[in-house]
Image (cartoon, rainbow, N blue to C red):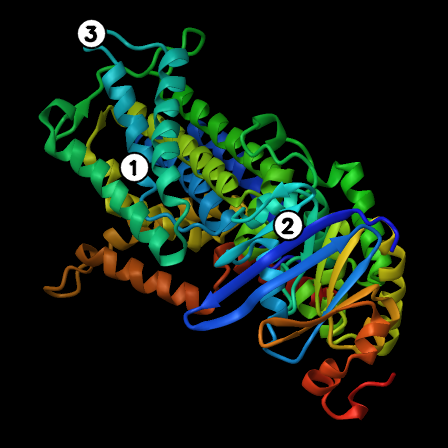
């Protein structure tokens, strides 16, 4: 195995909701240049894992490190500023804003905020060249250029999913957590998004939670299979394909995915 | 970048034209109006500044404060304390001190309240405003329930604020200045972030925005601008009492913003003027038999606001825009 630069890792991560362990003793590593896919049946704890890593939920126990910092217990905004971006399984956008304004805010988030600096109150947001460029590139990559002036609430569900991606792209994050980014997208957009992910991978560490097995096996470098909040198996795609435990526990009937 | 906005942040031509006409009317008014009406319009302009300061929280950031009058009153009281009995106080020291006092109070109270959300935010802002109200109401040293008198308007050296017309134009300049400042702020990175917080605060945090500090900055700034309005109010009326920071004052400001249309500051101005005019209309309603309708102005106002929200949820501004949009359609 070649040398890997770990950008994010979680150790013995556990999240309990009352008696239920939604995530139980999970270890995950995200390496630069790798796409780490997490798959598993509904309720396996994939989204909870994503929420723990992004700081949306505090873990019950375990530690998370990002770029050498112990970020366990940090707020989502602080984690985000350490160059982590995420998308949501349930579309989470600024519905009344145009597509452009959605992505522009995401791009703006990388600037110094300085809410207390009166001089910044008089600056024009539309005049931030670097922000506009990042915004335009992200919208273009996500394939939404035609829709950039449309109100986000009125575009199709699939386009809203593309918008989720565009917002993550605009944050220029080094570590990306993508929670079912392809769900609800048309096959054409899906294929395009897979290409985008492949291109992004080189300079980033990506966690991909996804149900689309074709996409997962097309892009993932490592696959972790979760069942009932625990890691069942983790390794390269070939190992997962061959795993008997995975076949039995998750894949169930042989025809559920095409090897 | 002119995306359609549900919040009317971008003002249509018709509204811009209306504002210019309104400004022209305000400039011309002191030359034709009597002293009584000059005072009245002056008060409306001050309330418009107050309503705009609340709109920054209510319409832009999505924080409905039911205690905004506290910051209005604090600056008014500050001017009353700063004005000696036998001489005026300098505008250039008293204004920054009074506005700074309101800002400081908003910063401290804001630090505690902006971490709450929705109904809780409404309740705590009200609770703090009531605390401030009773602090002044119950303490003889702070003027008690009767309040305090100011024998002089602030001394501005170059301009004579004791002159009604001069004071009127000074207020108008403040109104225009605050409006221009807030419109500019609305389109700044800070303003965009505040809008984002209103629409989806959770997403803002996930994007890395420190929403707490943004909200606190907005709360403090809104308090400071409310303070400017309160300062002018105290200077104009020559006395302050606890009512200035009372519940009614706060509630009226909310109604003004809703009446005019939220989130664009023009609506707040239109709302403040309309609200005050309606008050006069309702208070002067003729008696029907033994029933003195004018006495029940609060009821009429309440019914009016309810009707407006049902038929024109975006306020008078929304109504105007709809009217003009329909006309344009017919022309095409």
Q: Is residue B157 left or right of residue A229?
A: left
Q: Position of residue B133 (x, y in %)?
A: 21, 38
Q: Position of residue B277 (x, y in %)?
A: 36, 47
Q: Is residue A62 left or right of residue B138?
A: right
**B279 or A220, which is in the foreground?**
A220
Question: Residue beneath label 3, please?
Answer: B86
Q: Is residue A119 visible?
A: yes
Residue A111 quadrant: top right
Of marks 1 and 3, the one in the foreground: 1
Question: Quick one: label 1 or label 3, which is nearer the N terminus?
Answer: 1
Q: Is residue B172 left or right of residue A179?
A: left
Tell me if mark 3 has few (under 14), some (14-19) or many (20+) residues whose alpha carbon lies within 10 angstroms of its own. Answer: few
Question: Quick one: label 3 or label 2, which is nearer the N terminus?
Answer: 3
Of marks 3 and 2, the one in the foreground: 2
Residue located at (47% from left, 66% from top) = A16
Which label is found at residue B207?
2
Residue located at (24% from left, 56% from top) = B298
Q: Is residue B3 visible?
A: no
Q: Position of residue A202 (x, y in %)?
A: 88, 52
Tell me if mark 2 has few (under 14), some (14-19) or many (20+) residues whose alpha carbon lies within 10 angstroms of its own. Answer: many
Whether label 2 touches label 1, CB < 8 Å: no
Of helix, strand and loop, which one carries label 2? loop
Q: CA distance from mark 3 to mark 2?
A: 56 Å
Residue A229 quadrant: bottom right
Question: Residue beneath label 1, please?
Answer: B70
Examine the rendered structure and indicate whether residue A144 appears above or below residue A79: below
Residue located at (19% from left, 11% from top) = B85
């Amino acid at each position: 195995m070649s040398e890997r630069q770990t950008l994010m890792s979680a150790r013995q991560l556990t999240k309990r909701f009352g008696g239920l362990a939604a995530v139980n003793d999970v270890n995950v590593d995200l390496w630069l240049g790798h796409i780490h896919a997490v798959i598993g049946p509904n309720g396996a704890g994939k989204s909870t894992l994503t929420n723990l890593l992004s700081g949306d939920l505090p873990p019950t126990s375990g530690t998370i490190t990002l770029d050498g910092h112990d970020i366990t217990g940090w707020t989502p905004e602080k984690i985000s500023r350490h160059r982590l971006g995420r998308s949501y399984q349930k579309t989470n956008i600024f519905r009344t804003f145009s597509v452009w304004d959605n992505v522009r805010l995401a791009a703006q988030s990388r600037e110094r905020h300085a809410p207390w600096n009166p001089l910044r109150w008089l600056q024009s947001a539309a005049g931030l060249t670097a922000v506009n460029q990042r915004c335009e590139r992200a919208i273009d990559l996500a394939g939404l250029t035609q829709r950039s002036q449309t109100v986000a609430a009125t575009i199709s569900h699939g386009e809203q999913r593309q918008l989720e991606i565009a917002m993550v792209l605009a944050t220029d994050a080094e570590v990306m957590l993508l929670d079912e980014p392809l769900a609800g997208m048309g096959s054409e957009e899906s294929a395009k998004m897979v290409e985008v992910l492949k291109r992004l991978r080189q300079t980033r560490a990506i966690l991909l939670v996804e149900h689309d097995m074709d996409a997962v096996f097309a892009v993932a470098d490592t696959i972790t299979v979760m069942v009932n909040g625990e890691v069942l198996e983790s390794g390269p795609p070939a190992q997962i394909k061959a795993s008997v435990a995975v076949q039995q526990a998750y894949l169930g009937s042989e025809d559920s995915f095409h090897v | 970048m002119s995306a359609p906005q549900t919040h009317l942040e971008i003002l249509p031509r018709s509204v811009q034209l209306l504002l210019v006409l309104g400004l022209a009317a305000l400039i011309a008014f002191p030359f034709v109006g009597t002293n009584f009406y000059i005072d009245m319009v002056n008060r409306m302009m001050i309330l418009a500044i107050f309503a705009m300061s609340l709109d920054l929280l209510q319409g832009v950031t999505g924080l409905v404060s039911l205690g905004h009058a506290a910051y209005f009153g604090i600056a008014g009281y500050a001017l009353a304390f700063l004005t000696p009995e036998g001489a005026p106080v300098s505008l250039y020291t008293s204004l920054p001190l009074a506005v700074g006092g309101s800002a400081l109070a908003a910063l401290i109270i804001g630090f505690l309240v902006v971490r709450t959300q929705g109904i809780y935010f409404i309740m705590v802002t009200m609770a703090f405003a009531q605390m401030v109200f009773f602090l002044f109401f119950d303490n003889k040293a702070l003027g008690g329930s009767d309040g305090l008198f100011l024998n002089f308007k602030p001394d501005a050296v170059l301009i004579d604020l004791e002159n009604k017309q001069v004071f009127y134009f000074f207020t108008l300049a403040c109104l225009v200045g605050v409006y221009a400042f807030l419109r500019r702020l609305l389109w700044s990175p800070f303003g965009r972030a505040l809008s984002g917080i209103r629409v989806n605060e959770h997403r803002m945090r996930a994007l890395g925005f420190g929403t707490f500090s943004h909200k606190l900055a907005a709360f403090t700034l809104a308090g400071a601008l409310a303070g400017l309005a309160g300062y002018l109010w105290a200077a104009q009326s020559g006395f302050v009492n606890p009512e200035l920071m009372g519940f009614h004052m706060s509630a009226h400001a909310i109604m003004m913003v809703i009446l005019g249309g939220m989130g664009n500051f023009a609506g707040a101005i239109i709302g403040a003027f309309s609200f005050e005019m309606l008050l006069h209309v309702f208070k002067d309603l003729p008696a029907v038999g033994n029933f003195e309708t004018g006495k029940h102005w609060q009821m009429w106002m309440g019914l009016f606001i309810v009707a407006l929200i049902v038929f024109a949820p975006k306020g008078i501004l929304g109504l105007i825009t709809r009217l003009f949009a329909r006309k344009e359609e017919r022309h095409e």
